Image: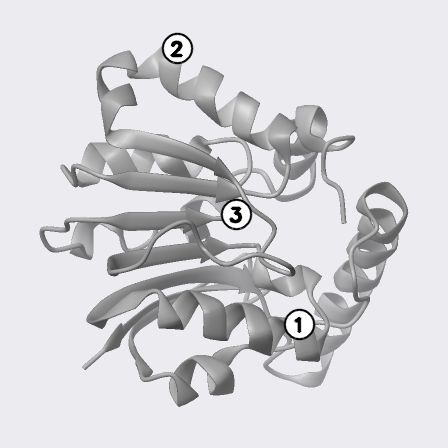
Amino acid sequence: MNFNRVAPYFERLEKIVFRDQMQKCRTAFLSNLPALNKIAVIGEGDGRFLLELLKYSDCPEVHYIDSSQTMLDLAHRRLQTHIPGDLPRVKFYRCDLTSENLPASDYDLVATNYFLDVFNEVTLKQCISKIANSCREDAIWLYADFQITGERLRKLRTAAWLKIMYLFFKIAARIQTQVLVDPASCLESHGFKLVHQAEFNRGLMRSEYRQRL
């Protein structure tokens, strides 16, 4: 997979198709966060979530992790432009979880927004295990992504959107899968229980606040 080609256009495409709904989904539970010591933001992309996270949390160590160097560069420039005083709190890592481990451990918060949906079921389970094994026993997991749920018409609408999006990203970024795999059961198996949940864009997306309790 390689998101370097689409990285410069990601924000524009997102806003054209979904307006502000994806960003609202990403940031839904930031006001619920407790004091934190080490955060991993994984596969987040161009840095819009990062800016909001830093506004809500005074965590001294935030690891921004992505497999795309272009995405990392965009996030770094966004941070430098808007809140340069927070640069010392953030470390940027190029890391591909399909073949590498996270750069550190003992995270008490991980965020995976619109990241887990690019993997097939086998790789998804492997990536979730790697992330979970790098977390503290009471860690929080923030998750935002698309979902297929609800009545028949809503499922058909979601399936149509996902078919278009998966086809686009299969061509543009060579993602692994064209089928959405719900990670809920895998997250549960690693001890991350659902605490809060919210839906956006008429149920097309959901945001979750999970924690090992």
Residue 11 appears anywhere in the view: no
Of tags 3 and 2, the one toward the viewer is 2
Of tags 1 and 3, the one toward the viewer is 1
Residue to which mark 1 is pinned: 123
Three-letter residue code for mark 1 = Thr
As helix, strand or loop, the secondary structure at mark 3 comes to helix
Residue to which mark 3 is pinned: 22
Three-letter residue code for mark 3 = Met
Of tags 1 and 2, the one toward the viewer is 1
Task: Residue at 77% x, 72% y: name it.
Answer: 179
Circle nearer the N terminus (1, 3): 3
Picture quadrant where residue 110 is located? bottom left
Residue to which mark 2 is pinned: 81
Circle nearer the N terminus (3, 2): 3
Classify 10 Å Cα crowding around label 1: few (below 14), some (14-19), many (20 and above): some
Task: Residue at 58% x, 63% y: name it.
Answer: 116
Q: Could you say which disc has been placed on residue 182 in the image?
A: none
Three-letter residue code for mark 2 = Thr
Classify 42 as above or below 10.
below
Residue 153 appears anywhere in the view: yes
